[in-house]
Amino acid sequence: MIVCSFCGREIEKGTGKMFVKNDGTILYFCSRKCEKNMLELKRDPRKYKWTKRYVKGGIKKKEK
Ligand SMILES: [Zn+2]
């Protein structure tokens, strides 16, 4: 079963979208909402409660 790259929900066969980035990374999206959040808004799914990847209490700052 394919899982949405943004929200982490399972995608049924025949639905959703497969997106291949220029660098070869394959992303799957269950909906336009997920696609937009990932590609256009460049959001981190761990920050949003409506995704399955949400991390309670937020992410520890490691970046930079
Ligand atoms: Zn999704």
Image: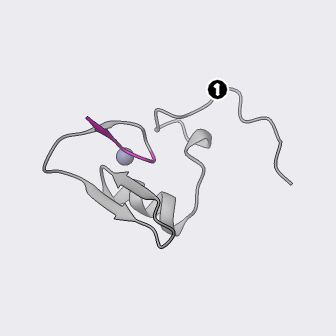
Q: Does residue 16 show up magenta in the picture?
A: no
Determine the image quadrant of residue 34.
bottom left
Q: Residue at x 45, y 47 (%)?
A: 6
Q: Tell how many labels.
A: 1
The residue sitting at the front extreme is 24
Identify whether 55 is placed above or below 39: above
* Residue for badge 1: 56
Crowd class of label 1 (few under 14; some 14 to 19; many from 20; radius 10 Å): few
Q: Image check: 15 left or right of 39? A: left
- Amino acid type at circle 1 is Lys
Quarter of the figure that contains the C terminus: bottom right
Q: Nearer the viewer, residue 62 or 35?
A: 62
Q: Identify the secondary structure beneath mark 1.
A: loop
Q: Magenta part of the protein: which range?
A: 1-6
Identify whether 9 is placed above or below 63: above
Q: Image check: 63 left or right of 8? A: right
Q: Residue at x 41, y 57 (%)?
A: 26
**Residue 61, percent from left and from top:** 82, 41
Q: Please identify the dominant SS of the magenta region.
A: loop
Q: Image check: 17 left or right of 56? A: left
Quarter of the figure that contains the N terminus: top left
**Residue 14, percent from left and from top:** 13, 50
The residue sitting at the right extreme is 64
**Residue 7, percent from left and from top:** 43, 42
Q: Residue at x 71, y 34 (%)?
A: 58
